[in-house]
Amino acid sequence: MALDSYQKRTFKQVGTRPNRPDGVDKVTGRAMYGADATAPGMLHAKVLRSPHAHARIVSIDTAAAEALPGVKAVVTAADFGVPEDAFLRDVQDHCMAREKALYDGHAVAAVAATTLAAAKAALKLIKVQYEVLPHVTDADEAMKPGAPVVQAGRAYENVPAGMSENVTHHCEFGHGDLDAGFAKADHIIERHFKTAATHQGYIEPNACLASVTSDGKAELWVCTQGQFFYRTLCAAILGMEASQLRVTASEIGGGFGGKTMVYMEPVALALSRKAGRPVKLVLTRDEVFRATGPTVSSSMDVKIGMTKDGRITAGQAVLRYSGGAFPNTTVDMGAQAAFAAYDLDAVRTFGWNVMTNRPKESAYRAPGAPLSIYGVESVVDELCQHFGLDPLKVRLLNAATEGTKSSYGPTFPAIGLKATLEAALAHPHYSAPLGTNQGRGVSCGFWFNFGGNTCVSLSVNTDGTVGVTEGNPDIGGSRASISLMAAEELGIPYEKIRTIVADTSSLGYNDVTDGSRVTFAVGLATIKAARDAIRKMCSRAAKIWGIDEEAVEWVDGAAVPAGPNAGKFPPMTLAEIAAVSAETGGPISGHYEVNADGAGVSFGVHLCDIEVDPETGASKVLRYTVFQDAGKAVHPSYVEGQMQGGAVQGIGWALNEEYIYGADGKLQNPGFLDYRIPVSSDLPMIDTVILEIPNPGHPYGVRGVGETGIVPPLAATANAVSRAVGVRMTELPMSPPKLLKALEAKG
Amino acid sequence: MQYVAAKTADEAVALLAGHSGMARVLAGGTDLLVQLKSGMVEPDLVVDIKRIPGMKDITPEAGGFRIGAAVSGAELGEHAGVCALWPGVVEGFNLIGSTQVQGRATMAGNLCNASPAGDAVPSLVAADAIARIHGPNGSRDCPIGDIPAGPGRTTLAKGEIVTSIFLPARPARASDAYLRFIPRTEMDIAVASAGVSLVLAADGAVASARVALGAVAPTVLLAEEAARVIVGTKLDDDTLARMAAACSAICKPITDKRGTIEFRTKTAGVMAKRAARIAYDRAGAKT
């Protein structure tokens, strides 16, 4: 059964919408989230944070705090080593400032005490002597010669000499002759864009419970998108062997990429090691905003040439991303994704990363892509307006398809972009009339998707039920999707399967839940593990029937003789084989381990109708439709949920969400009141249209769907607003004061 | 921190007047508890006034209503009499927070929290509502607009508490309205706001009006010129434009994370003219 790649089939269970197995626990409040873990003798921890955007730490005096009754441990950077590896050192320095506080909210010390009140009181007794340094929070300012240097000597070799030391990384992608391309254009538009940093905005604040015993064994219960990667980082920072640290992932109240990185977990472990007792550390919302996440901010220049009949002749983008006070390469993904939707002869993107005195960037749903694609899709829209061309038809004319050499190098296999654009063009939304002060925006979006290290263990129980053990937290209904795929492959009902998320001591390494990888890669491993178990069950049946293993095949949940020559035996069901397994060779289980390839890129197209109040600059989204290629929607409700959630986060990014810094370099809005995520009454129901263009790299054709949905909304929203008001909006968010100012400048 | 649930207004006043440290009054607690949890304030004494008899009563009085200091938004919103007489006061108050917050929040608390952006306050000023204050020297009545002194500060003397707010009677063809600008549709704080109360003459023109603006100065502003502009008119577009300009002319806002000076100044006028139109239509619909 060499069915490694996609094979067309008729699904019986995949594509249905059963209840999620974790649903009852979640709606009844029984589910255990990060802050729900407790242990006997547990201490409560609080973190002391820098009030300065940039300051040298001259000294930290913890004596008075340690003397306070109830305080059991105080840690600072002195309680950690200095990792040689630069990446690991940055991770640790982000968790606990060493030498310098690099942003407002940077941790400088932490306390564990018998009560939260004692821990809070102890923070006030820690005396930190700071030498306040000049700071910079804006990417463009940070690139200027003479800007305050966030960290010296951190530039990679690819950065030309003579630039600000804050510039750490440069990249370039593309092909063809740009000059010749622009020369063929009938019109060229070049625009400067700027976008603010945004936070993933997960509802559950980061939380963990750490317990290190005197013999050096440790447990960490934590809200994470990847217990194995957290183990890797924490063990390395604490100087432990991986086998001695067991990490258990709690249920997760949202992550969106933000919980792929440790923030305070090594600190909790260090406190527990020092105090000899379990330590619980739960961040406040203020801390979540100031010291976790966020995404990069950007400053971008995009230049595109087009003929009068809508053919793009050349495209160029210069991207300057800032991911806070540490080097990162997120701009690579922005530079690769920028023009991915187009089949171009001449395209070039240049990326720069620049450090600023802001928290260290973390992944956020399709990291880097929404920004560059916002710039490109805005300029394409403006060119369509210039020539009076239909924006969807222009995109169809230029769309990448199977065989297109992508703007970032690889040649595309079968992709769903053209079908997605055609679905949008034919949808009633696209031809619905618009009223006064209303505009309709269109944007394409793209994401690479990822596979990665994955293993799954599947056990056949003697009563005919099946357990699936996987290693990625269930962040978007994955237990349901994985159970569905196991049920489909085994030919038994969904209800007979129970899928659990294993801790790091119970299964081999699994990459973090990122890159929209879980339904693809864990699904693939589950199908393969099921096939492994099926092979074994066929073998047991063969043994019972006294025929060759090869003469048995699996049909509808049962072993049957493969054809009339194999002999005449009634089918043996999974339950029947499992019931006698002790007599035929012992327990039956299936396994599969892979570093999965072939994730299959994903495209989406969004339509957005907006009305702008010309007297206040307020934007109201009237109608919104997402068209996205899912390859195969395993559980369509959760695919739709991903598409809707991505759209809503992108709309928030476009309209109101932003990190606002004062002249003092402090974050002005570390809370949900002034960091404005859309509330449910702000938006209409987001309509979804799922397309299924099978991914050749997955047995069922599945593509990841989690990230593409956040890519188009920035431009779709900006294009709708720009068309509604007749002014091109080039800065996000398009908050009402900014929009009203643009309207008044237009006159 | 000491917590006392006072049984009488006199007891509350005595506790507050006799205390030397930081003291706070607790009614709904929707501001105070947030401030306590975030560490913004650390009072030595919290005096809970919502168990004092009468604090949760809505009582008809002289053709109007007396609203106890601990009456919640949800309770006021379900009171048909107050909703009919002063719909703008109720709608301003009911905009505060979420459904859960409305179960606790009080108008008196919103007034005494003294945020320039308090949503209950502009309509109360437009209504010419009167606060009854109990203190060490007994009771006194005070116009609502005289209570805020600046962001987070009131003119109340040490030991004084607001015990009720009185909404007066009004003629048959009269009504009010409140509008605020927020970037979202709910769960937000006014960037600029306006409460408008007006009475119509027999011919349908505005006979008298009061206009109050929120979030555009350290305290709520009474826009007297804007009110004069609309008196004698039927709120034609030209009048409304002049009214908006008169509102903008008196704004003294700040630029902060929620909005710029220019934005608040313009938007306050827009809110006022739109609220005036709503109040006018409400009054006109009455017979």
Image (cartoon, rainbow, N blue to C red):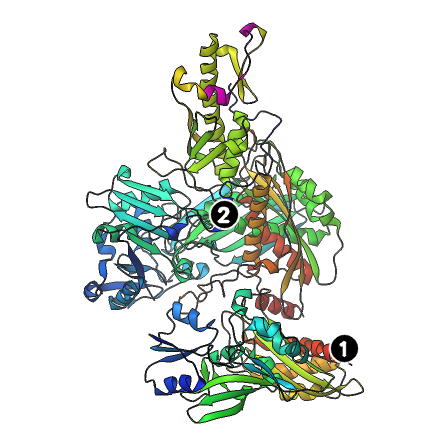
Q: Amino acid at mark 1?
A: Ala
Count of marks, rendered view: 2
The magenta region covers A565-578
Circle 2 sits on which residue?
A365
Residue nearer the viewer, A448 or A311: A448
Vertically, is B56 above or below A197? below
Which x, y percent locates residue A505? 33, 36
Taking the magenta stretch, the answer to whether it contains residue A29 is no
Q: Label 2: how many residues lie within 10 Å, few (<14), some (14-19) or many (20+)?
A: many
Q: CA distance from mark 2 to mark 1?
A: 52 Å
Q: Are marks 2 and 1 in contact (CB under 8 Å)?
A: no
Q: Is residue A719 left or right of residue A338?
A: right
Residue under the point 54% across and 65% down:
B98
Residue reaching furthest right?
A: B203
Q: Percent from the top left, x then y, of residue B22? A: 35, 80
Q: Secondary structure at mark 1?
A: loop
Disc 2 residue type?
Arg
